[in-house]
Image: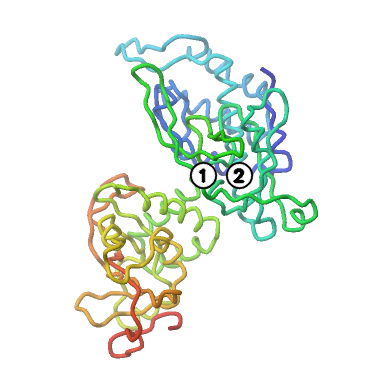
């Protein structure tokens, strides 16, 4: 096998790729199936390497390769002596002499090339995704590009040239790489390109289907759900097992979630300002919305889970302080049980599913924020002008819940501002009664 083809990365400044790769944590698994799919976007892992120092050696070599634009030959020249010295190069298992425990599997030169190719391409493409999002206003159409030679998978070839808008759900699953040693890439196109070259546009729509893939062998085999794209030929394009996710999007969502998690216990005004500024970046908000939507659409939500979906508008915080009602937290959250209750279609005047599935978007962009003075417990009303009528969310301030901190990795009591319910108000249910509601931000 020759040196990896990184021609897809030409013209891409390495900073975006480096930022993606360096933001990863570590994960360990004996088999590649043990650290599954989207987890690879959040953590650096090498199947069979269960020693932290060896993982750090490999990761350091990959980081140097990305920063320096190195080839596999450069990478192997640096790493191979280190692995030889520690006894990790070659074939067979590594056994801890003191305990008798298996510490991992040795790495062959072929495995090293797979590690190099997969990690460098994933990092470059995640960086490319971020840059494409930043420029989506000028180049909103993204074109799938496959390398057309005798080493390209037939179904990857069949995707070559297809163009989808940047916000089409197709890219949530199929932004490359889509498999081991996949060399596919994406090209951003502007409206003039589309018109000048008469390029047909695609929409994933009903062609995006739910399928299952088998991973593992023998008694270790199991079926896992994934997405497929129905081709005109009748075949279904799927990513290889272990792929089928957008690494750049996953990591942006993680950054947004960690910011919200840290902000729960931060000074409320500072938290509100930090979250408001971070989610003003379209790519961060979009990633958070996609992540929340995937959670909200599950048939069965994890019991007792809480999701942070945004923060109180900083201007509303200023007005709350004037009323001597500054909350102890600036963050807004929702529990699984409240989401399930709010989405019951038997409820009169229920908000549509689309509203709940894009809740971080709605929290970031209400038409008005009001202080509800009709109840003993201080509450906010987030109001929305909608085709069906006037929508509202009821957000109880300083609600104490039991939740898990992403940052500390611990479960405990936290105070947040909790979305309890929402509905579409019928005509006549005005919010302009100054004795009941105080306008904090926006317009009714």
Asked if residue 93 is positioned above or below residue 208 in the image, the reply reads above
Distance between the alpha carbons at the discs numbered 1 and 2: 25 Å
**Circle 1 sits on which residue?**
208
x, y percent for residue 366 = 44, 72
**Circle 2 sits on which residue?**
127
Q: Please tell me whether mark 2 sits on a helix, a strand or a loop.
A: helix
Q: Quadrant of the C terminus?
A: bottom left
x, y percent for residue 279 = 49, 61
Asked if marks 1 and 2 touch (Cβ < 8 Å), the reply is: no
Asked if residue 298 is positioned above or below residue 268 in the image, the reply reads above
Asked if residue 435 is positioned above or below residue 330 in the image, the reply reads below
**Pick the front one: 363 or 266:** 363
**Pick the front one: 352 or 239:** 352
x, y percent for residue 74 = 67, 23
**Pick the front one: 340 or 272:** 340
Q: Residue at x 37, y 11 (%)?
A: 95
Q: Quadrant of residue 60?
A: top right
Of mark 1 and mark 2, the one earlier in the sequence is 2
x, y percent for residue 259 = 42, 55
Query: Horizontal placement of 145 versus 443: left or right?
Result: right
Q: Residue at x 36, y 88 (%)?
A: 432
């Amino acid at each position: 096998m020759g040196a990896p083809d990184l021609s897809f990365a030409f013209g891409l400044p390495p900073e975006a790729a480096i930022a993606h790769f360096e933001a990863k944590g570590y994960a360990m698994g004996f088999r590649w199936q043990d650290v599954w799919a989207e987890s690879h976007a959040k953590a650096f892992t090498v199947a069979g390497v269960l020693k932290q120092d060896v993982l750090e050696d490999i990761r350091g070599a990959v980081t140097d390769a990305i920063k320096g634009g190195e080839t596999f030959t450069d990478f192997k020249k640096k790493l191979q002596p280190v692995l030889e010295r520690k006894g990790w190069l070659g074939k067979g298992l590594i056994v801890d002499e003191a305990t008798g425990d298996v510490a991992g599997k040795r790495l062959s030169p072929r495995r090293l090339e797979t590690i190099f190719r997969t990690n460098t391409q994933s990092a470059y493409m995640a960086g490319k995704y971020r840059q494409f999002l930043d420029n989506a206003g000028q180049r909103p159409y993204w074109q799938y590009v496959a390398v057309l030679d005798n080493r390209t998978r037939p179904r990857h070839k069949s995707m070559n040239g297809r163009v989808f808008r940047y916000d089409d759900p197709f890219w949530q699953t199929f932004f490359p790489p889509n498999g081991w040693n996949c060399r596919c890439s994406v090209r951003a196109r502007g409206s003039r390109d589309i018109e000048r070259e008469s390029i047909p546009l695609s929409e994933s729509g009903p062609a995006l289907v739910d399928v299952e893939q088998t991973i593992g062998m023998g008694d270790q085999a199991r079926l896992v759900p994934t997405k497929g794209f129905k081709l005109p030929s009748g075949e279904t394009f799927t990513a290889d097992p272990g792929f089928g996710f957008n690494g750049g999007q996953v990591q942006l969502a993680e950054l947004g979630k960690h910011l919200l998690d840290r902000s729960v216990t931060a000074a409320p005004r500072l938290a509100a300002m930090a979250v408001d500024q971070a989610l003003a970046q379209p790519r961060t908000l979009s990633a958070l919305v996609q992540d929340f939507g995937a959670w909200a659409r599950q048939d069965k939500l994890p019991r007792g889970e809480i999701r942070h979906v945004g923060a109180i508008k900083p201007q509303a915080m200023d007005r709350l302080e004037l009323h001597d009602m500054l909350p102890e937290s600036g963050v807004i959250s929702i529990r699984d049980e409240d989401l399930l209750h709010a989405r019951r279609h038997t409820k009169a005047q229920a908000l549509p599913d689309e509203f709940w599935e894009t809740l971080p978007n709605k929290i970031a962009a209400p038409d008005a924020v009001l202080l509800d003075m009709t109840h003993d417990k201080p509450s906010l009303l987030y109001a929305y002008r909608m085709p069906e009528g006037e929508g509202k969310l009821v957000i109880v301030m300083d609600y104490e819940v039991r939740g898990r901190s992403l940052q500390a990795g611990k479960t405990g009591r936290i105070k947040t501002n909790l979305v309890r319910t929402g509905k579409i108000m019928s005509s006549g249910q005005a919010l302009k009664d100054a004795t009941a509601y105080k306008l904090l931000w926006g317009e009714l």
